[in-house]
């Protein structure tokens, strides 16, 4: 009989980046790389585990903005084009490296890998990733949680309840459309919590959300089981807290697994390493060098002189790390069980895109981990967060603390010198959206259409990613432009609706461009 | 004479093969030459090549040494830089200590119950001490590629965002246990109107600690007052007051005291430590919708924010409910200090963990996939 549970949670999210007005757009690569390195490899791991009869449970958030991109035909076709180009590049690489056996083997590895990804995406999955995740959900292996509709930072909308409500209910609706059922859990964007957000979760019958460790431990009163059991907030919605120990073990810069010298070096990419004229057809058409995903070196050490990547050695290391992770969880769960007198749950949440994209061997680590957990021990089992609450419906009542999982644990990352300027505009747009929904919606078709588009523009402007990118000092120009454009498009619609002078041609072009949430419900903004 | 290694593998070859080889390496030989002569010519070439290799090796060694020297120097430079940074850090520390001191003085000085006539208060500059992040996360030289000036965005002629919406509004958020962030907007008309009543033609931001009081404009437990520089529309106020309540106002000083122009709602600062209190458990079956549970509780439930406590009370009283629940409810041993240390000090350690774990990696992710990083590095 198991002594406790491990809940691994992968948070998959990307901001909605889709630019039909360009033939190619640099930031769309965020999505394409994540498909190649994270989403498809994860599905492949699930498939293998299921085929081999390995019982496993994983919690996965898929944000509605990411799901919208996965469902978008333009992006799907552009991804395929991207993949074909990589197959072509790696084909050429096989020829170029024919006298360098170590690199040649890697060129073959990538060539075969990209061909397999193409087979999976185009032929096996018919370009529909959502359907595949849904398949594993329906088979009971994974539980899919939702996120705010566009990953809006909810505590900064607290004064405008309709804005919080629209983020949550729009997410619930889109999740239902994609996965055929209502979400039972939510990943509050950036784990950012404020007291009372449960009111909106209650309405959506979302039964649990995730907090960072201190969000739970600083709650009132402090939870007697720490973060090793969920709590019920006064609203009756449950909350789980992040286990810092297992997080640190994977992601700590000093001690974390991904920094192992045998793993693939992220920064050395042929997009930057090879002759400009040779690589030109495979980088951005404007001549901007980009990451191609073809990387020949391993981390090697704290040196610039990198050694060639050895796939077998890297996989061997991933297996060792999986064993180490499992061993640590066994000891941790045994200890917690003996101390707390309950079957504890250890929640280990990670950014999904870091498995595979940053940590190339991450999906294989998960593959080995699930197999080892299933075959090699009986101290703990993996579990979905719904299942734990179903089995253990009696929990302590705690009022959680304001918190987020950002730097220093509160809201600073999203409210500081580089990005605080966005909030007067965002809040004004939220007020105006409420006015449009209350006073102008439902009067005539064209204006209704315009108001629905205004809602999309507002949601897109609310994405917490823009403030985050401004803060990190990278891609700032793009983030500023995205935020500003959405607010300005919103404002133009607002003015046109109020003056009953909607420009239909322009509206059509905006609908075509920012086509997220086709069935958006304006009622939520009332 | 011992034959050189370079010629030993030539001896076994036919004259024709040697001629072909000579042609390949552009050694001038003729078919009239003897095999020995051709081998000698080729041997010379091989020796030359060997010499060249040796030279190249020496050159490489030299370069390596040079590189080592350079590395040494750059390490030295880096060490100097670190020293400098440390000095700066020390300065920053002393400045922050100074600030802390001033804040302490200020707390003592200004956190007294205000009486009618406004007094001159210490006005602190808006200061935000940020942690210094490690450098060298990315080796920038790798990204010195491509010309971003060629990248153009499609213009849509949407105009620009306004500086002000010309409405009177104030927004406040408790950013963390130490800082309040606030922004405001005022119409020109409002500003003009209030300034006519001001004794010094200045706007002030007044941050009131209103914990346990119903604020009426004059009964704050203590307050901070800052003069607002012209054009400023937001403020980060350092209060360092976990779990205390604040109201922020934009005011002018009039002959009769502070005259509020804008007053925010009350905000409570987040907690920064663990708290003990009465432990209550409740059974909430997962597969019964919350709305259904609300119906079961009926009019006894005044607001959904009381659902869990009301249900817990009914379960403790062993009332009949249409679903099974655990009775008696567990009491729960308070082991939290054993896990997290007294007052949850262990939690603070992990807050740093959050920073390290996700921010770093997401930053790197964005950095490496974005066009802007290329601009920045150029």
Image: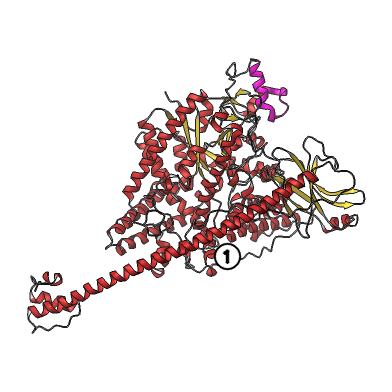
In the image, residue B77 lies at what x, y percent?
Answer: 49, 63
Image: A50 above or below B149: above
Image: A207 above or below A317: above
The quarter of the picture where residue A491 lies is: bottom right
In the image, residue B231 lies at what x, y percent?
Answer: 77, 60
The one nearer the camera, A295 or B227, is B227
The quarter of the picture where residue B44 lies is: bottom left
Q: Main secondary structure of the magenta part?
A: helix
Task: Report crowding for label 1: few under 14, some 14 to 19, many 20 or more residues within 10 A (C-alpha).
Answer: few
Please tell me whether residue B192 belongs to the stretch shown in magenta. Answer: no
Q: Which residue is pictured at 36% across the width and 44% down the height?
A: A317
The residue that mark 1 highlights is B153
Left-right relation of A53 to B77: left
For the question of whether residue A66 can be seen, the reply is yes
Left-right relation of B42 to B84: left
The quarter of the picture where residue B43 lies is: bottom left
At mark 1, the secondary structure is loop
In the image, residue A323 lies at what x, y percent?
Answer: 38, 37
Quadrant of the drawing holding the N terminus of chain A: top left
The one nearer the camera, A176 or A356, is A356
The one nearer the camera, B322 or A325, is A325
Q: Which residues are magenta?
A: B297-320
Q: Which residue is pictured at 39% across the width and 53% down the height?
A: A301
């Amino acid at each position: 009989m198991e002594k406790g549970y491990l809940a691994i949670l992968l948070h998959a999210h990307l901001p909605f980046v889709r630019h039909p007005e360009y033939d190619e757009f640099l930031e769309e690569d965020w999505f394409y790389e994540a498909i190649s390195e994270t989403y498809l490899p994860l599905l492949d791991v699930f498939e293998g585990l299921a085929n081999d009869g390995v019982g496993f449970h994983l919690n996965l958030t898929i944000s509605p903005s990411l799901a919208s991109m996965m469902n978008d035909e333009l992006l799907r076709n552009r991804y395929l084009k991207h993949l074909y180009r990589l197959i072509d590049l790696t084909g050429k690489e096989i020829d170029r490296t024919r006298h360098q056996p170590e690199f040649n083997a890697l060129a073959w590895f990538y060539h075969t890998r990209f061909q397999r990804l193409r087979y999976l995406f185009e032929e096996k999955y018919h370009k529909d990733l959502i359907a595949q995740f849904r398949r594993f959900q329906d088979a009971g292996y994974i539980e899919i949680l939702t996120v705010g509709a566009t990953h809006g930072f909810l505590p900064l909308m607290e004064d405008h309840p309709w804005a919080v409500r629209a983020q949550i209910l729009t997410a619930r609706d889109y999740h239902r459309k994609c996965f055929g059922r209502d979400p039972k859990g939510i990943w509050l964007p950036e784990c950012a919590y404020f007291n009372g957000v449960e009111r909106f979760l209650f309405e959506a019958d979302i039964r649990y959300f995730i907090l960072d460790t201190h969000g739970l431990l600083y709650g009132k009163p402090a939870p007697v089981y720490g973060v090793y059991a969920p709590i019920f907030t006064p609203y009756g919605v449950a909350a789980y807290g992040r286990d810092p120990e297992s997080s640190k073990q994977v992601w700590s810069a000093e001690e974390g697994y991904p920094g192992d010298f045998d793993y693939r070096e992220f920064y050395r990419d042929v997009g930057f390493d090879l002759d400009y004229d040779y690589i030109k057809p495979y980088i951005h058409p404007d001549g901007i060098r980009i990451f191609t995903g073809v990387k020949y070196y391993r981390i090697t050490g704290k040196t610039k002189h990198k050694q060639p990547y050895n796939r077998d050695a890297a996989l061997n290391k991933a297996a060792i790390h999986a064993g180490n992770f499992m061993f640590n969880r066994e000891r941790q769960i045994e200890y917690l069980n003996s101390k707390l007198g309950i079957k504890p749950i250890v929640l280990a949440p990670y950014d999904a895109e870091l498995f595979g994209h940053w940590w190339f061997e991450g999906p294989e680590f998960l593959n080995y981990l699930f197999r080892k957990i299933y075959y090699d021990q009986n101290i703990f089992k993996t579990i979905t967060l719904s299942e734990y609450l179903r089995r253990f419906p009696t929990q302590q009542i705690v009022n959680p603390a304001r918190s987020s999982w950002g730097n220093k644990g509160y809201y600073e990352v999203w409210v500081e010198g580089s990005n605080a300027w966005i909030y007067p505009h965002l809040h004004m747009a939220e007020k105006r959206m409420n006015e449009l929904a209350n006073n102008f919606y439902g009067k005539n078709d064209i204006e209704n259409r315009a108001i629905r588009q205004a809602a999309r523009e507002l949601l897109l402007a609310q994405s917490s990613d823009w403030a985050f990118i401004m803060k990190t000092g990278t891609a700032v120009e793009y983030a500023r432009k995205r935020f500003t454009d959405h607010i300005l498009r919103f404002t133009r619609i607002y003015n046109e609706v109020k003056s009953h002078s909607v420009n239909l041609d322009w509206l059509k072009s905006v609908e075509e461009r920012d086509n997220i949430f086709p069935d958006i419900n304006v009622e939520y903004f009332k | 004479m011992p034959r050189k290694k370079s010629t030993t593998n030539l001896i076994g070859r036919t004259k024709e093969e040697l001629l072909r080889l000579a042609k390949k390496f552009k050694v001038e030989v003729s078919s009239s030459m003897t095999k020995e002569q051709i081998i000698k010519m080729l041997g010379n070439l091989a020796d030359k090549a060997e010499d060249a290799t040796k030279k190249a090796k020496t050159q490489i060694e030299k370069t390596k040494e040079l590189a080592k020297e350079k590395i040494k120097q750059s390490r030295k430079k880096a060490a100097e830089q670190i020293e400098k940074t440390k000095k700066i850090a020390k300065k920053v520390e002393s400045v922050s200590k100074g600030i802390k001191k001033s804040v302490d003085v200020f707390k003592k000085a200004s956190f007294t119950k205000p009486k009618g006539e406004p007094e001159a208060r210490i006005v602190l500059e808006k200061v935000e001490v940020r942690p210094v992040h490690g450098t060298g996360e990315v080796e920038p030289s790798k990204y010195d590629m491509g010309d971003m000036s060629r990248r153009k965005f499609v213009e849509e002629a949407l105009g620009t965002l306004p500086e002000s919406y010309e409405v009177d509004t104030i927004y406040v958020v408790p950013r963390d246990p130490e800082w309040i962030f606030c922004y405001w907007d005022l119409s020109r008309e409002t500003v003009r109107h209030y300034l006519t009543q001001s004794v010094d033609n200045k706007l002030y931001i007044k941050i009131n600690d209103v914990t346990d009081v119903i604020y009426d404009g004059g009964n704050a437990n203590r307050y901070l007052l800052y003069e607002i520089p012209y054009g400023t529309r937001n403020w980060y106020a350092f209060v360092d007051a976990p779990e205390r309540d604040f109201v922020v106002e934009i005011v002018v000083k009039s002959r009769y005291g502070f005259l509020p122009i804008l007053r925010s709602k009350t905000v409570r600062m987040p907690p920064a430590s663990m708290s003990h209190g009465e432990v209550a458990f409740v059974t909430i079956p997962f597969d019964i919708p919350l709305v259904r549970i609300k119906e079961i509780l009926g009019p006894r439930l005044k607001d959904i924010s009381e659902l869990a406590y009301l249900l817990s009370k009914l379960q403790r009283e062993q009332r009949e409910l249409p679903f099974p629940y655990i009775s008696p409810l567990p009491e729960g041993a308070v082991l939290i200090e054993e896990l997290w240390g007294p007052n949850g000090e262990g939690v603070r350690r992990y807050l740093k963990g959050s920073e390290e774990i996700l921010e770093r990696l997401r930053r790197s992710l964005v950095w490496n996939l974005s066009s802007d990083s290329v601009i920045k590095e150029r």
